[in-house]
Image: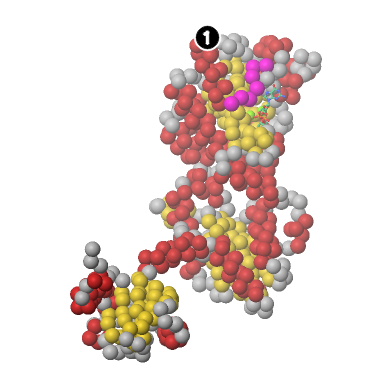
């Protein structure tokens, strides 16, 4: 078999020069003085100069057009020292004659023929690799929604500034108040549009001395100001607060947002970067805890403030994000016949390290951190989904949701519930909402309109834990309740204490007059049940009939009841 070495010199030259011309890689041959002696088509296409212009000229004669001066100097230096039959590689940004910058990978071989040195140079266009690298670099450093630097970029910038030891800086953390509520009521897409408008407004302020404006994700923002004058930063932050006084317009709706701002500064509040960020975070948490919509500059007392249980709040927020709340269902029965008419949904927190937690462990914190509406929505979603499941199985029972009256201040409360019911095609009468007497008393006036709106929606309302909140009995006629739930403290010793019996009798008589039904809570034995039935309570709940149970257990109880009659 003939190979290339067996061919004549002419044939060899013809084939190799053809191969060289057809190569997709840009190739040039330089002489010992770095003059072009040959260039191929790809090279001509790459840099946009003709062969006849190049041959005989010095590589780099048009250096300002092709290789940057600094790169060219390095290349020439490396070539002059390059041993025979060795190669040299380098990446550089080439400027074509069309004025476009192209990332190039260059390999140069030092060859010898007829005692003369030659350089064979191969250029690879790295554009696509470079583009990928740029994309990765972008994703690593910027938030894709707002195109603002992300946390990683922010941290790097802050550490650079802190290295410049004379530079005083203010670290600012910003978050949007009731962000979760916005997301649950408006949807993530709308909130993303809102966030972009918010960012645009801040950028338009052209805040002076702002060294970095970063978006860590969600409603989580941060800024670094180079401090020359503290009051200047105070003014800049005031203008941030003011821009929220003008409404935003998203998808034809007018929306207002409020922000909370926490600030720490170097050197006053710490020397190290992580301490400064932590202190700004603490100031932010503190002001949010105080109701938000304000700026707070870190003070040392925050380090000793036991009131802010940051860990618990972090855990709670994570619980929402990771759906760690679960619903248990406790049966509610008709006392006369024992039929299950519905279930009360009771929240449990499936904590990743502490196990299944009862509401007494966390409801207080949920209310303090203003998360009760978020909880209500999560529970409502579960309840509505379960009702839809029962509807398919042709099972008839209602579900009761607990609500803190604070949630009713949310203007979106009724709409959110209405949408949820409509989406799953659930008859509102199958939802009962329970609120405690004490939460109601705190917000007597504000709540009246909301309760009326809920009634108009068609859901049933129940007054929970009746007898413990010292509500004036006259309240009962002001509010449109369908059920009154007599607190378990009246039930626990009712068989031994005639006075408790008198109280319950008075309640049932009043409820009758107001056309409300009574549910007795916490019934644990049969004697209590008989007595309460005699006293006029129509419904009952308690361990006697069933403890709070899982969704599947509740469903099979209902299935058994439908199949075999009362269970
Ligand atoms: P509640 O609404 O009065 O719920 C009844 C509580 O009494 C439940 O406790 C239930 O497990 C308990 N219980 C029921 N029958 C008996 C009985 O026969 N004996 C005894 N000793 N206890 C009985 P749980 O689940 O710990 O809930 C406590 C409170 O937490 C609830 O009282 C309610 O006010 C609140 N809660 C529960 N789930 C939610 C929720 O999703 N949202 C809100 N805002 N509050 C909730
Ligand atoms: Mg309840
Ligand atoms: Mg109760």
| Label 1 neighbour load within 10 Å: few <14, some 14-19, many 20+ | few
Left/right placement of residue 229 relative to residue 192 reads right
474 is within the stretch colored magenta = no
Residue positioned 56% across, 57% down in the render: 220
In percent of width and height, residue 130 lies at: 41, 67
Q: Quadrant of residue 470?
A: top right
548 is within the stretch colored magenta = yes
- Out of 13 and 495, give the one closest to the viewer: 13
Q: Is residue 379 visible?
A: yes
Q: Provide the secondary structure element on which disc 1 rests.
A: helix
Please tell me in which quarter of the rendered image ligand 1 is found.
Answer: top right
Q: Quadrant of the C terminus?
A: top right
Q: Quadrant of residue 69?
A: bottom left
**Total marks in image:** 1
State which region is magenta.
Answer: 544-550
Q: Is residue 98 above or below residue 219?
A: below
In percent of width and height, residue 557 lies at: 56, 17
In percent of width and height, residue 328 lies at: 60, 28
Residue positioned 77% across, 19% down in the render: 493
In percent of width and height, residue 3 lies at: 25, 67
Q: Which residue is mark 1?
A: 564
Mark 1 lies within 8 Å of ligand 1 (Cβ measured): no
Q: Is residue 483 above or below residue 21?
A: above
Residue positioned 39% across, 81% down in the render: 110
Q: Which SS does the magenta portion mostly show?
A: loop
Q: Is residue 535 above or below residue 440?
A: above
């Amino acid at each position: 078999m003939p190979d290339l070495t067996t061919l004549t010199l002419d044939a060899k030259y013809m084939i190799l020069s053809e191969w060289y011309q057809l190569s997709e890689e840009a190739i040039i041959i330089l002489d010992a003085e770095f003059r072009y002696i040959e260039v191929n088509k790809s090279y001509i296409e790459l840099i946009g100069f003709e062969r006849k212009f190049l041959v005989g000229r010095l590589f780099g004669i048009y250096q300002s057009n092709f290789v940057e001066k600094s790169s060219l100097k390095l290349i020439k230096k490396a070539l002059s020292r390059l041993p025979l039959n060795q190669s040299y590689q380098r990446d550089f940004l080439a400027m074509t004659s069309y004025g476009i910058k192209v990332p190039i990978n260059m390999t140069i071989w030092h060859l010898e023929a007829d005692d003369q040195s030659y350089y064979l140079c191969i250029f690879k266009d790295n554009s696509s690799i470079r583009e990928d690298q740029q994309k990765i670099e972008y994703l690593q450093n910027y938030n894709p929604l707002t195109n603002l630097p992300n946390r990683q970029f922010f941290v790097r910038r802050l550490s650079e500034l802190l290295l410049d030891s004379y530079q005083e800086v203010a670290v600012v953390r910003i978050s949007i108040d009731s962000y979760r509520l916005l997301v649950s009521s408006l949807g993530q897409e709308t909130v993303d549009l809102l966030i972009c408008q918010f960012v645009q407004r801040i950028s338009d302020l052209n805040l002076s001395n702002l060294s970095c404006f970063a978006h860590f994700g969600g409603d989580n923002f941060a800024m670094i100001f180079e401090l020359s004058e503290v009051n200047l930063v105070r003014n800049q932050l005031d203008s941030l607060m003011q821009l929220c006084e003008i409404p935003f317009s998203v998808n034809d709706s007018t929306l207002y947002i409020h922000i909370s701002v926490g600030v720490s500064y170097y050197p006053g509040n710490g020397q190290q970067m992580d301490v400064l960020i932590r202190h700004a975070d603490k100031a932010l948490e503190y002001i949010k805890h105080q109701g938000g919509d304000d700026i707070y500059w870190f003070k040392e007392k925050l380090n000793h403030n036991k009131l802010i249980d940051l860990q618990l709040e972090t855990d709670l927020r994570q619980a929402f994000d990771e759906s760690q709340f679960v619903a248990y269902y406790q049966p509610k029965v008709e006392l006369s016949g024992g039929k299950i008419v519905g279930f009360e949904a009771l929240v449990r927190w499936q904590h990743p390290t502490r196990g299944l937690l009862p509401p007494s462990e966390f409801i207080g914190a949920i209310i303090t951190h203003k998360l009760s509406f978020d909880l209500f929505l999560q529970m409502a979603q579960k309840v509505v989904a379960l009702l839809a499941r029962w509807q398919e199985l042709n099972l008839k029972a209602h579900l009761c949701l607990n609500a803190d009256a604070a949630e009713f201040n949310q203007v979106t409360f009724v709409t959110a519930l209405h949408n949820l019911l409509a989406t799953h095609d659930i008859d509102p009468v199958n939802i009962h909402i329970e609120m405690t007497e004490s939460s109601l008393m705190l917000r007597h006036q504000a709540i009246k309109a909301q309760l009326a709106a809920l009634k108009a929606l068609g859901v049933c309302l129940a007054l929970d834990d009746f007898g413990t909140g010292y509500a004036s009995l006259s309240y009962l006629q002001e509010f449109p309740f369908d059920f009154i739930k007599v607190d378990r403290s009246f039930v626990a010793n009712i068989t031994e204490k005639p006075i408790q019996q008198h109280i319950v009798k008075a309640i049932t008589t009043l409820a009758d007059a107001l056309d409300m039904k009574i549910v007795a809570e916490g019934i644990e034995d049969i004697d209590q049940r008989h007595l309460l039935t005699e006293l006029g309570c129509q419904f009952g709940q308690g361990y006697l009939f069933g403890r709070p149970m899982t969704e599947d257990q509740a469903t099979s109880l209902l299935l058994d009841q439908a199949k075999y009659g009362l269970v």
